[in-house]
Image (spheres, rainbow, N blue to C red):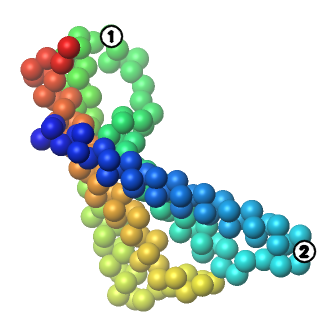
Amino acid sequence: MTRLLPLARPLARALALAGVVALGLAAGVTLLDIGLSLVGGGIAGEVDLVQLGVMAAAWLAMPLAFLDEAHVSVDLLSARLPQRLGLFLKGLGGLLAVALMALVLRYGWDAAAQQLRFGDVSQELGIPIVWYWAPLLAGAALSVLAALLVALADLTAAVRGPAR
């Protein structure tokens, strides 16, 4: 399963790039709205568009953050442990991340399904609210996979010894 890590990375990078583009578009819409407000105009639905862009940016970048181990961590204790024990504890922490992301996915799915059933839409543009949940669901699902791959790699290295 750890051989899947190199295969997962291009997909995670593509999703993260889509998230960066979404954030760039959200920033562009905001700047354009500010510019237009100086001449008495504005963009209808700017808040709806920016919220959607920010949701996409945050959640679509998450799988790559797991794969690249880019989340904030504190290693005051683990740096002093024997390498294999440190890898084992890191792997256990990764499994906790898998569980957390699985819960996010499970409850996010329930919330998205409820929004879909009720037909909720955004306030200004009428964007279906389920669209706001789509990046969260995609990011959470792929984060489960990414965190699992990294945790298994760490646990495997703890058992076999790290690759030299």
Relative horizontal placement of residue 48, taking residue 135 as reference (left or right): right
Q: Amino acid at mark 2?
A: Val
Q: Residue at x 82, y 67 (%)?
A: 35
* Closer to us: 104 or 46: 46
Q: Tell which residue pokes out farthest to the right in this image.
A: 39
* CA distance for labels 2 and 1: 60 Å
Q: Residue at left 48%, top 56%?
A: 19
Badge 1 crowding class, 10 Å Cα cut-off, few under 14, some 14 to 19, many 20 or more, is few
> Would residue 10 be found to the left or right of residue 135 on screen?
left
Residue holding disc 1: 80
Q: Are marks 2 and 1 in contact (CB under 8 Å)?
A: no
Q: Residue at x 15, y 22 (%)?
A: 158
Query: Where in the figure is residue 100, as x and y percent of width and height?
Result: 30, 50
Residue ID at (62%, 63%)? 26
Residue for badge 2: 39
* Residue 138 placement (x, y as % from top left): 34, 62
Q: Residue furthest left?
A: 160
